[in-house]
Amino acid sequence: MSRILPPQISFADLELYRLGIPLDPTLQAVANFLDEQQSVVEQVRKDLERGLKNPRAGRDGMAPSQVLRSLVLMRIKNWDYRELRERIDDGLSLRSFTQFDSRPVPKHDAFNRAFCRITPQTLQEINQKVIQAAVELDLEDGKTLRVDTTVVETNVHYPTDASLLWDCVRTITRLIEDLHEMLPQGVKGFTNRTRSARRRMQEIERMTPQERVHQQVPKYRELLSITQQVVQKASGAEEEIQKGGQSHG
């Protein structure tokens, strides 16, 4: 279950406060901001207790403020769950920021479960609070939306330089061959170089470290030369097609 931070501090926490360990200026500003967002903390508490028959029963979980601050810290530092847990556990300043202080830090999977319970509506409210504060401080006008992409696993090959050059040759050749089938006059003077480009690419990819010392540069030059020839031929074919279209028009 989620819990409320105990109102009475322990002797260990008192000793920690006595040390007066300063926070990073950025984290201090974030901590001051989060101290004022009690409505968000309350919403996080509701998310953590959502769906539980008896939220007050069972083992004590993380407090809503700890979950919120840990989530913010994870986003700021771009850490994964394991690193987040290790950094908080090892650092007195991060313990202070996340309000774990001298208390045990949960395992990484506990952070994962807690963060997953936070609803999109709560995250949207947090985002709106941040934007509102930035506008009030003249740090942001709030008119521009930044959209990030999400990385997902796919069957696209790893983009090495050699494979990208071969992709260019392969794709251009395929498009030119499609045009050759579509146009009545076809495409003249274009040679399919995909096999030679692929052979050079594979030779480069399969080189041993010793072979790369003497063979990599010459093979890359051959692959670059083939790619340039294909691009030039494709450009010439495009010009011929445009001239043919104008003459028919």
Image (spheres, grey):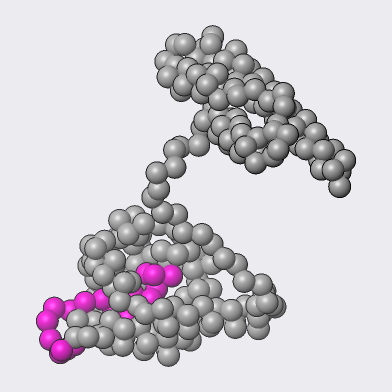
Please tell me whether residue 241 belongs to the stretch shown in magenta.
Answer: no
Q: Is residue 148 left or right of residue 55?
A: right
Query: What percent of the width, then of the height, locates residue 204?
Result: 49, 19
Residue 51 in view here: yes
Residue at screen point 26% across, 61% down: 108
Residue at screen point 62% across, 37% down: 181
- Extreme-left residue of the structure: 58
Q: Quadrant of residue 232?
A: top right
Q: How many marks?
A: 0
Query: What percent of the width, then of the height, locates residue 2?
Result: 24, 82
Residue at screen point 40% across, 44% down: 155
Q: Nearer the viewer, residue 149 or 229?
A: 229
Residue 22 in view here: no
Query: What percent of the width, then of the height, locates residue 38?
Result: 42, 89
Q: Nearer the viewer, residue 236 or 123?
A: 236
Query: What percent of the width, then of the height, locates residue 91?
Result: 35, 59
Q: Is residue 49 above or below residue 247?
A: below
Residue at screen point 47% across, 75% down: 31
Q: Is residue 183 above or below residue 123?
A: above
Q: Quadrant of residue 237?
A: top right
Please tell me whether residue 63 belongs to the stretch shown in magenta.
Answer: yes
Q: Quadrant of the N terminus?
A: bottom left
Q: Nearer the viewer, residue 209 or 83?
A: 209
Q: Is residue 216 left or right of residue 116?
A: right
Q: Nearer the viewer, residue 166 or 10?
A: 166
The residue range painted magenta reads 53-72
